[in-house]
Amino acid sequence: MNKLVRITEKDMVAVALQPLAAGSSVSYGAGEVTLLSDLPMGHKVALRDIRKGEPVIKYGFPIGEATEDIPRGAHVHTHNLHTLLSGAKEYGWTPTHPAAERREPAVFPGYPRKRGRPGIRNELWIIPTVGCVNDIAKALARQAQQFVGGAVEGVYAFPHPYGCSQLGDDQDNTRKVLASLATHPNAGGVLLLGLGCENSGVEQIKPYMGDYDESRVRFLITQQAEDEIAEGMRLLKELADVMQGDTRVPCGADQLVVGLKCGGSDGLSGITANPTIGVFSDLLTAMGGSTILTEVPEMFGAETILMNRCESEELFQKTVSLINDFKGYFESYHMPVYENPSPGNKAGGITTLEDKALGCTQKSGSSAVRGVLKYGERVETPGLNLLSAPGNDLVASTALAVSGAQMILFSTGRGTPFGCPVPTVKIASNTPLAQRKKNWIDFDAGRLLDGMTLPGLGSELMEYVLEVAGGKLTRNEQNGFHDLAIFKQGVTL
């Protein structure tokens, strides 16, 4: 196994693939460097002398500026490197025109729906319109476990604290989120559960649901029911009876929408797991399917790569707004735009936001950007889409599900157990994590460092995704972890 990797020939640093001791002489490609200090796995070492004030290159791009002279063999991290990023920018479009490969869609067994794409699950969802009825939703979910079996693959409640005391766009976004989940293809049946006096109640959310399948949705306003539990169970029984007639049938992968997300990243995430997801993204979009890349603050520093892959100047301008509007969101709350990476990221070897962003965007592969989505907006255009949402793991993953993703691919270097409303596939950047946390991790991308090729691993991930789409349970599903988090963007009354 190699001990250091230099990602591109332009790079001034290499990344440790295992813990390395001071004084070791370690080879990288055609070169060799002697370490001046211990180097943890995922961390960077200087391959040549770097002067104070000089941009430091990794992934072929600057990841920051040296704050002091850095000798060859020295550890390069937060103590001697800082970000070059600042506020909103003006951008120019230099289109790269990625090749548009076409492949025959693979097939998976899914649940066809009268409206929209097929589901990869047939679950019964209880969605509160307001936090006041969260406990009723959870009580109904507990009692309704009796309906699980046959074609009813699970019963889940999705409590949240919103739906009232909100204003303007913030309230509108909550309505969009709840309406989109109420019409999600993975839900074979939905009970929309309201209180009756909230701002975003059943009657307010219905118009956002569009042309929904009325046989799949029931509504309950608890203030109008004498016994809301009994009435809720009656409605859930109706939905479960409808769902028992559902069967999986062959569906094309061109009908798949897969969200792309990373969290708890380390210095290997941009070398193993994220590029593997990128190969998958290119494969799926070549089949006519769709992928969605989000966590906009973690695009800062690599945004021009995505901008130049936009299929049209209109999409380029939308991407510019996507980036600068999110910077404006931070500034409107008088918060630093570049308060990133997290402590866990830094411990794993990520030094600056540019370092993180250049690794993060590897998940997008190399195909053209064909759609740019606002928060709460559904995917309409096949191919790679960009979505406005923050970096927070559960908020961003929920946003991907709201935009139509039937599953999420979630890369991680440090591990995380959570699951969002749809299957959340955890992809480890390193094999030790995959071996240590088998109850969390679904796929080991660290094998890329042990001789597997990137195309081979990406193809294997595609096969795994098709298995999950066909009913194979992810670790979060096996553990019973299903959560919802709405992006709060305004005042609370």
Image: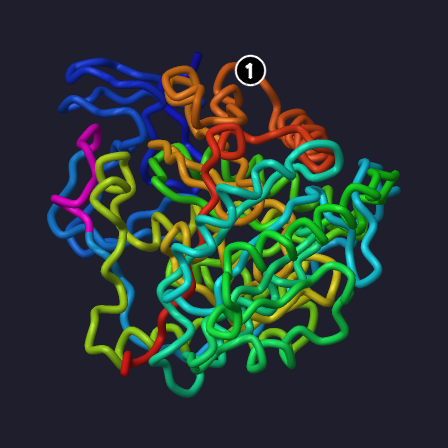
Stretch in magenta = 72-81
Q: Is residue 203 above or below residue 254?
A: below
Report helix, strand or loop for mark 1.
loop
Q: Is the stretch drawn in magenta largely helix, strand or loop?
A: loop
Tell me residue 433's x, y (percent).
38, 22
Tell me residue 280's x, y (percent).
65, 39
Q: Say whether residue 75 is magenta.
A: yes
**Residue pushed farthest front?**
226
> Which residue is the site of mark 1?
451
Q: Nearer the viewer, residue 92 or 159?
A: 159
> Is residue 300 in sight in this rendering?
no
Q: Nearer the viewer, residue 372 or 303?
A: 372
Q: Is residue 204 above or below residue 124?
A: below
Residue visible at 48% across and 75% down in the picture:
173
**Picture quarter containing residue 414?**
top left
**Picture quarter containing residue 332?**
bottom left
**Residue pushed farthest bottom?**
168
Tell me residue 356's x, y (percent).
36, 48
**Picture quarter containing residue 432?**
top left
Q: Is residue 440 left or right of residue 339?
A: right
Residue visible at 20% across and 41% down in the picture:
77
